[in-house]
Image (spheres, helix red, strand yellow):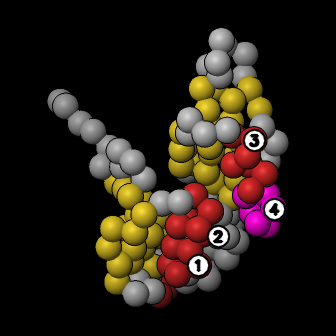
Amino acid sequence: MNLSLNSIILFVNNVDILKDFYIKFLNLKLSEEIKSEWVLLNAGNCTIGLHKIGEQYQNSIDNQTETNTKIVFETTDDISVIRNSLQESGAAIREISKFENYDFIFFDGEDPEGNVFQIRQIQSK
């Protein structure tokens, strides 16, 4: 079986707020949109869909504090500059970290609904 990841879809309470976050702070590009219901964002080799959660589930994930999903972005830009910019803009951002025997430095953050993302950069040797 030959598979490749095409899209990740997050079911969210507020499509517009998250769309603005990912475009403004992570510089993703809008591919398609149904106003306040659906957006598709270009994230390099994959797209991220933001889908309005069903009415019966709305507000059940207000600012969720736990999630089992993390979206990981890789950059060749200065990770410290990216982190500082996100932090100055008010985004919830953690410290830059590194694991032993792992070739990347990284930091985690959360979007306005608590979805976790990571930005990583290969560590020069």
Q: Residue at x 38, y 58 (%)?
A: 42
**Which quadrant of the structure image shows residue 113?**
bottom right
How far apart are the alpha carbons under marks 1 and 4?
Answer: 18 Å
Image mark for residue 113: 2
Give how far across and how far down residue 33 sits, in percent.
Answer: 35, 78
Contact (CB < 8 A) between labels 1 and 3? no
As drawn, the label of residue 80 is 3
Q: Amino acid at mark 4?
A: Glu
Mark 3: which amino acid? Answer: Ser
Image marks 3 and 2: residues in contact by CB distance under 8 Å: no
Closer to the N terminus: mark 4 or mark 3? Answer: 3
Amino acid type at circle 1 is Ile
Left or right: 107 in relation to 6: right
Tag shown at residue 88:
4
Q: Which residues are magenta?
A: 86-91
Residue bearing mark 1: 17
Judge by depth and name the residue closer to the eye, 115 or 102: 102
| Front of the two marks 1 and 4 | 4
Look at the numbered disc 4 and give the secondary structure of its residue. Answer: helix
Which of pointers 1 and 3 lies earlier in the amino acid sequence? 1
| CB contact under 8 Å: marks 1 and 4 | no
10 Å crowding of disc 3: few (<14), some (14-19), many (20+)? some
